[in-house]
Image (cartoon, rainbow, N blue to C red):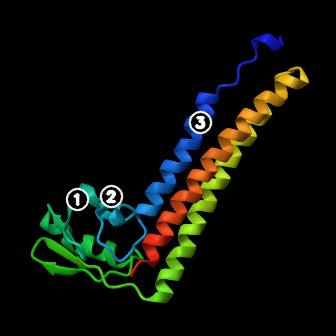
Amino acid sequence: MADEFELDTDDLERRMDGAIANLRTEFGSLRTGRASASMLEPVMVDAYGSPTPINQVGTVNVPEPRMVTVNVWDKSLVGKVEKAIRESGLGINPQLNGTIIMLPIPELNEERRRELGKVAGQYAENARVGIRNVRRDGMDQIKKGDLPEDERKMWEQEVQEMTDRTIKRVDEALEVKQAEIMQV
């Protein structure tokens, strides 16, 4: 029976990579004082009776480093898009120009930078928790495998090394994001 045991390390790796991908998406939505189309990804617009991502009701562009524009396709939704942006908590004041909504990105003050750094830390910690949960699942599979001790330890070591590598990637991504946030 021990010979039949095979841990699906590809599945564990894929799930850990999913936590990293989710972290990158969350980091993309954090405002760093520079314009980025991804900062509007979490904004949902009440369009046609259901919450709709902003990029499905208009074109999001970054024409200059401190400006994001949203060219709303349906004129009747301009007010709803503007309202969604105001209520999103991004701290951006939209300006209307016909069907184009301009979003000037203000300079971040020191206090707001520190807050964003803490939020980035929370996102990274959530990713670490997700990775540790995947590790726990792998370890549980190994324990249920009825393996000889040396083989069990070899599998546990492999899962632990995979976990350590992935958490190191989270820490590196957090360092880069915090440096980006604190950059004036």
Task: Determine crowd level at label 1: few under 14, some 14-19, many 20+ residues with C-alpha closer than 10 A.
Answer: some
SS class, disc 2: strand
Residue 76, placed above or below residue 126: below
- Labels 3, 1: front one: 3
**What is the three-letter code of the residue carrying label 3?**
Glu
Task: Give how far apart the Cα atoms at labels 3 and 1 are.
Answer: 35 Å
Q: Are marks 2 and 3 in contact (CB under 8 Å)?
A: no
Q: Which residue has dot 2 on it?
A: 53
Q: Which residue has dot 3 on it?
A: 13
Which residue occupies the extreme right position in the image? 149
Q: Which residue has dot 1 on it?
A: 57
**What is the three-letter code of the residue carrying label 1?**
Val
Task: Determine crowd level at label 3: few under 14, some 14-19, many 20+ residues with C-alpha closer than 10 A.
Answer: some
Q: Residue at x 70, y 24 (%)?
A: 7
Quadrant containing the N terminus in the rendered view: top right
Quadrant containing the C terminus in the rendered view: bottom left
- Labels 2, 3: front one: 3
Between 88 and 17, the residue placed more toward the observer is: 17
Which residue occupies the extreme left position in the image? 98
Locate residue 164 relative to residue 108 in the image: left or right. Answer: right
SS class, disc 3: helix
Q: Are marks 2 and 1 in contact (CB under 8 Å)?
A: yes
Task: Give how far apart the Cα atoms at labels 2 and 3 are.
Answer: 30 Å
In the rendering, at what x and y percent does residue 157 appear?
A: 77, 35
Locate residue 133 relative to residue 178 in the image: left or right. Answer: right
**What is the three-letter code of the residue carrying label 2?**
Pro
Residue 133, placed above or below residue 92: above
In the rendering, at what x and y percent does residue 99 appear?
A: 12, 71
Q: Earlier in the sequence, mark 3 or mark 1?
A: 3
